[in-house]
Image: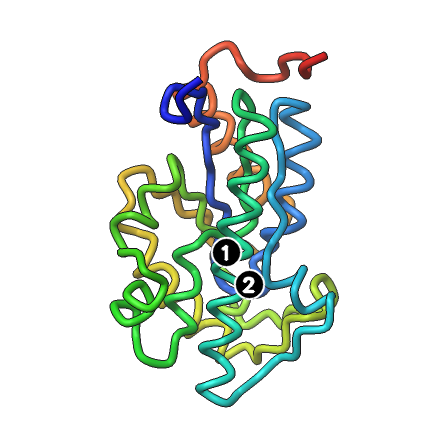
Amino acid sequence: MNPSDRPRPLRIALTGGPGAGKTTAADLFRREIGDDVIVVPEAATILFGGGFPRVSEEAAERSLQRAIFEVQHSLEDVQATRYPDRILLCDRGSVDGAAYWPDGASEFFSMMNSSYEVELARYDVVLFFETSAVGGIRFEGGNRYRTESNEQAVALDRRLHDLWSPHPRFHLVPHSPSFIRKITVGLSILESVVAELRPGRRNSDPET
C-alpha cells in the first residue's frame, strides 16, 4: 500500500503553559473516551526523565529544543503507524518548541527544516489549557521536571497561545479555580470535536 493511501488518525494537540493540567487531563480523557484514544506522551518529560538536563544557556537550549522536536515527531509518527484508525491525543505538539527558541519562532521552524504552516497543519484540533498561573495559583506537584516560576509560566502561556491560536480548530480551556470544572469544560470540547470529525467512533471497541 502506498503510504499516502493509509488511514490517517485524527491528531489532537493538547497544549498550554506550564501548570495547566495537560498531562492529567490527557489521562482522564483517555479513560473517559475509551480505547479509541491513544495518548502520545510529552517528549520533554521523556527526555528529562532519561537524563537530559534542564538548561539556561542559549546554545544548550537550542540543542534541547531540537531534540524535543525530533522526539515529538517520532513519537507521533510511530503511534500514527501503529494505530492508523485511532485518535492520537498528543501531550504537547511540535509547534511548542518555538515558544522556547532563543531566536524566535521563524528561526525555530527554519532550523527544524520545516515551517510554521506545516507544523500547525499536523494537528486536526488544538485544545489549549490555560495555565493556572494566570490566576495567581502556584502549581506544585505533577510534573517534577517543570521548574518555571509563575511569572515564567504566564509568559510561556501567552507565547504558546499566540502560536497555536491561528489554528482553524483552536479551542481554549480557560483557567478556573476549580480543576474539576476546567477538566469538564475540556472534556465537553473534546467529545464535541471527536463526534464532529469521527462520528460513530466514540467508545468503539479496540482492534483485535
Q: CA distance from mark 1 to mark 2?
A: 6 Å
Instruction: Note whether residue 98 is visible.
Output: yes
Q: Where is mark 2, residue-wise?
A: 132
Q: Is residue 19 above or below residue 103?
A: above
Type of residue at label 2? Ser
For mark 1, give the secondary structure.
Answer: loop
**Quadrant in which the C terminus is drawn:** top right
For mark 2, give the secondary structure.
Answer: helix
- Identified at 51% across, 83% down, the residue is 60
**Quadrant in which the N terminus is drawn:** top left
Q: Residue furthest bottom?
A: 57
Instruction: Note whether residue 178 is visible.
Output: no
Tell me if 104 is positioned left or right of 192 in this view.
Answer: left
Tell me if 40 is positioned left or right of 135 in this view.
Answer: right
The answer to whether mark 1 and mark 2 are in CB contact below 8 A is: yes
Residue 71 location, x and y as percent?
Answer: 55, 56
- Identified at 56% across, 58% down, the residue is 20
- Identified at 46% across, 29% down, the residue is 10
Residue 46 location, x and y as percent?
Answer: 67, 60
Q: Quadrant of residue 138?
A: bottom right
Tell me if 61 is positioned left or right of 142 in this view.
Answer: left
Q: Where is mark 1, residue-wise?
A: 175
Q: Which is nearer the eye, 12 or 72? A: 72
* Label 2 Cα neighbours within 10 Å, binned few <14 / some 14-19 / many ≥20: many
Q: Which is nearer the eye, 140 or 54? A: 54
Type of residue at label 1? His
Q: Which is nearer the eye, 66 or 129? A: 66
Q: Quadrant of residue 38?
A: top right
Q: Give the image's coloring scheme.
A: rainbow
Tell me if 35 is positioned left or right of 153 in this view.
Answer: right
Residue 59 location, x and y as percent?
Answer: 45, 86
